[in-house]
């Protein structure tokens, strides 16, 4: 299936690739990430996160591998933050951590790949999202680029939240449903923050839940802006674009008008499409 490169969305301004390579790269990442990279092959990608000892996410991302080389795609500002965080542990391993020179592009249409698959070429890669979107990574990607807003809106529709600078260490993976999307493997071995993440899972439903939110008109809303029920804060904004976004709720309002920035807001349920757990390589 040919891709419509003239309808390409440039998400390189908001997203970047962090490269981690070397003979010990898998060992380093397996001890730090919520996903099971030991079972990840070179034909699939998975979501994952890196947490503090308290289970709070430093960053979340999608990750793919080529042998001992791993690429993590995440918000640009977060790429350097995650590199610095992992560098604290990397001194004990034979690995290198660096910003990749590859660009990130997106298409709001499917390729010939199945959801969760990635196809590597000499200087590029193509991966398929469950909601029908296609991402392209590479040194050069031809095509006319469109505004990133369309990609951000697709993330919101898919229930995908990216930890940003403002929200770093604000949430555990379950708060943004990252576990439901396949970003946490509860059967893998120990990793930093696992005790907290696992405890929430085995105690049952998380006290915080992800929901959609919408205003009548488009406006700028910062991440972590409070969602109000009367004079009580019941949640905070996790992502925003135009007149809509995703919010992390600490409680579900039973009645009354929910407001955001003093405006009446409408809450809704998220539509989530999870990936299968990684395959053995």
Image: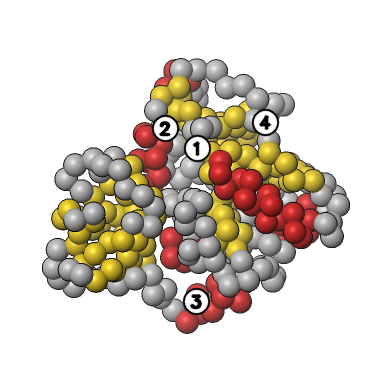
Mark 2, secondary structure of its residue: loop
Q: What residue is rendered at 23% in x and 54% in y?
A: 261
Q: In which quarter of the image is residue 17?
A: top right
Point out the tag, 4 or 1, that comes first from the N-terminus: 1
Q: Nearer the viewer, mark 3 or mark 4?
A: 4
Q: What residue is rendered at 75% in x and 59% in y?
A: 88
Quote the CA–CA distance across marks 3 and 4: 38 Å
Quote the CA–CA distance across marks 1 and 3: 31 Å
Quote the CA–CA distance across marks 1 and 2: 8 Å
Point out the tag, 1 or 3, that comes first from the N-terminus: 1
Quote the CA–CA distance across marks 4 and 1: 14 Å
Which disc is residue 148 wearing?
A: 2
Which disc is residue 14 wearing?
A: 1
Q: Nearer the viewer, mark 2 or mark 3?
A: 2
For disc 4, the marked residue is 101
Give neighbour class at mark 1: few <14, some 14-19, many 20+ (Cα, 10 Å). some
For disc 3, the marked residue is 200
């Amino acid at each position: 299936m040919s891709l419509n490169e003239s309808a390409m969305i440039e998400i390189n301004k908001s997203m970047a690739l962090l490269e981690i390579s070397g003979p010990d790269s898998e060992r380093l990442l397996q001890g730090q990430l919520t996903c099971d990279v030991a079972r990840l092959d070179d034909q699939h990608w998975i979501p994952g996160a890196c947490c503090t000892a308290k289970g709070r996410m430093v960053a979340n991302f999608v990750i793919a591998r080529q042998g001992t080389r791993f690429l993590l795609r995440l918000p640009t500002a977060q790429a350097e933050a995650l590199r610095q965080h992992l560098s604290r542990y990397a001194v004990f391993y034979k690995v290198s951590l660096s910003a990749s020179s590859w660009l990130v592009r997106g298409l709001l249409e499917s390729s010939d790949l199945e959801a969760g698959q990635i196809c590597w070429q000499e200087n590029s890669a193509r991966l398929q999202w469950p909601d029908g979107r296609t991402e392209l990574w590479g040194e050069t990607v031809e095509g006319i680029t469109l505004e990133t807003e369309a990609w951000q809106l697709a993330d919101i529709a898919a229930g995908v939240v990216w930890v940003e600078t403002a929200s770093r260490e604000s949430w555990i993976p379950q708060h943004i449903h990252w576990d439901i999307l396949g970003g946490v493997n509860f059967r893998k071995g120990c990793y930093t923050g696992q005790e907290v993440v696992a405890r929430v899972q085995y105690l049952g439903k998380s006290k915080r839940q992800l929901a959609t939110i919408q205003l009548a008109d488009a406006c700028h809303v910062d991440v972590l802006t409070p969602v109000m029920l009367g004079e009580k804060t019941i949640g905070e904004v996790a992502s925003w674009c135009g007149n809509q976004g995703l919010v992390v709720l600490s409680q579900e309002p039973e009645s009354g008008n929910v407001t955001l920035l003093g405006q009446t807001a409408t809450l809704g349920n998220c539509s989530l499409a999870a990936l299968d757990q990684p395959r053995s390589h």
